Amino acid sequence: MTVEWEIGGSKERMDASENMESEPQGSLWKIIYTSFVLLIMFVALISDKVGADMVMMIALTLLMASEIITVKEGLAGFANEGLLTVLVLFVVAAGISHTGALVSFYHHGESV
């Protein structure tokens, strides 16, 4: 089977058998390991016994430690500006919650 695609005006062609031969023989364990990590991660998230941030960091660490993804790939997502904005908002929300800064707004219309 031959696959063709066009990138930037130049046509590329690849035989499907070439891709199969270039794939390392040891990739089956990566599929099984990743599936296992994802399954455990989903169970942990559903059980809600451990924080979602901890579950995600553990899953990311397991995938990086097994070299399924590189450290550079694993940490690249943290450079996203949108993610950093959400992280800062979580810090601000935790600070407001712990200091009780919004308590006066909750009880503003109530008589004491």
Image (spheres, rainbow, N blue to C red):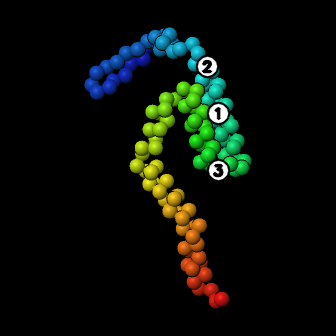
Location of residue 29 (image quadrant): top right
- The residue carrying mark 3 is 51
Q: Is residue 1 visible?
A: no
Which type of secondary structure does the marked residue at label 1 adopt? helix
On-image quarter of the C terminus: bottom right
Q: Residue at coordinates 58% horizontally, 15% vertically from top-left?
A: 26
User: Which three-letter amino acid code belongs to the residue tagged 3?
Assistant: Gly
Q: Secondary structure at mark 2?
A: helix
Name the residue carrying label 2: 28
Q: Is residue 51 left or right of residue 19?
A: right
- Amino acid type shown at disc 1: Val
Q: With respect to residue 112, does 17 lie above or below? A: above
Q: Alpha carbon of mark 1 to alpha carbon of mark 3: how far?
A: 16 Å
**Residue 55 image position (x, y, % from top left):** 63, 43
Kindly identify the amino acid type of the residue bearing the numbered disc 2: Leu
38 w.r.t. 101: above or below: above
Depth check, front residue: 100 or 85: 100
* Sequence order check, earlier mark of 2 and 1: 2
Identity of the residue drawn at 57% across and 36% down: 61
In the image, residue 104 sits, relative to residue 50, either above or below, namely below
CB of mark 2 within 8 Å of CB of mark 3?
no
Q: Can you give x and y, in whole percent of width and height, for residue 52 in the image? A: 62, 48
Label 1 sits on residue: 37
Pointer 2 or 3: first along the chain = 2
